Image: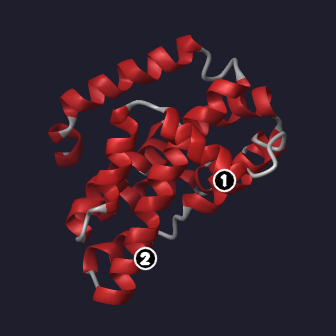
Amino acid sequence: RACMKAIRSSHQSANRLRAALVVAGLFADKSVYREVIALFYVATNTMEQKMMTLQQEKGDKICEKLLSLGYRFGPQYEQDLELLYSDSLDWKATVERVVASYTEGARSYIQKIETMTTGDELAGAAFCLWGALIIGGGAAAKPRVESLCGKDACHLFESVTGPGRGERKAAFIKLWDSL
């Protein structure tokens, strides 16, 4: 609750951005969807890699707690992006070009995550990047993505849908409350 209260105005901005993305074709145009998840992939994967490094090399307790949830969305994004960019010889290079072509805001956010040095800092990124999938609209987005891109492009949602979803959400909330 404290995190949601602290980001209330930012969350309203994020909701407006999400609405704008939907209107722009997020769930109606495969190329729009794949570009958006390419950006989220790079930010999320960067955060998860940094989290694992800090936990392993520095014994960061917050990173340890976050990783104890068992989430690792980077590989799931990769499976989907590999399929969505199957027309490309090298999907990773294509994703890099997408990120490079995007606004300074997206690149700046990724660079900020790259320079984070503590679990305290990464927790904020995890709350936004993971929370959007776990607590937010991950489960609701899956049928729309499946309709647009096919079942094979829905690996991203494996950890946030299906039996036990309520318990996973509760564990996420409990962990945040413990921080």
State how the image is colored. Answer: secondary structure
Residue 47: image x %, image y %?
Answer: 41, 61
**Residue for point 69% across, 27% down:** 31
Mark 2: which amino acid?
A: Met
Residue 6: name its quadrant.
top left
**Residue for point 46% across, 69% down:** 49
Q: Secondary structure at mark 1?
A: helix
What residue is shown with label 2? 52
- Of the 4 image quadrants, the one containing the C terminus is bottom left
Q: For the residues carrying marks 2 and 1, which lies nearer the camera in this image? A: 1
Which labelled disc corresponds to residue 92?
1
Quick check: 117 above or below 88? below
Camera sees residue 179: no
Viewer-closest of 107 and 137? 107
Residue 51: name its quadrant.
bottom left
- Of the 4 image quadrants, the one containing the N terminus is top left
CA distance separating discs 2 and 1: 21 Å
Residue 32: image x %, image y %?
Answer: 63, 25
Q: Do callouts 2 and 1 mark residues in contact (Cβ within 8 Å)?
A: no
Circle nearer the N terminus (2, 1): 2
| Left or right of 98 on screen, residue 63 | left
Camera sees residue 52: yes
Mark 1: which amino acid?
A: Lys
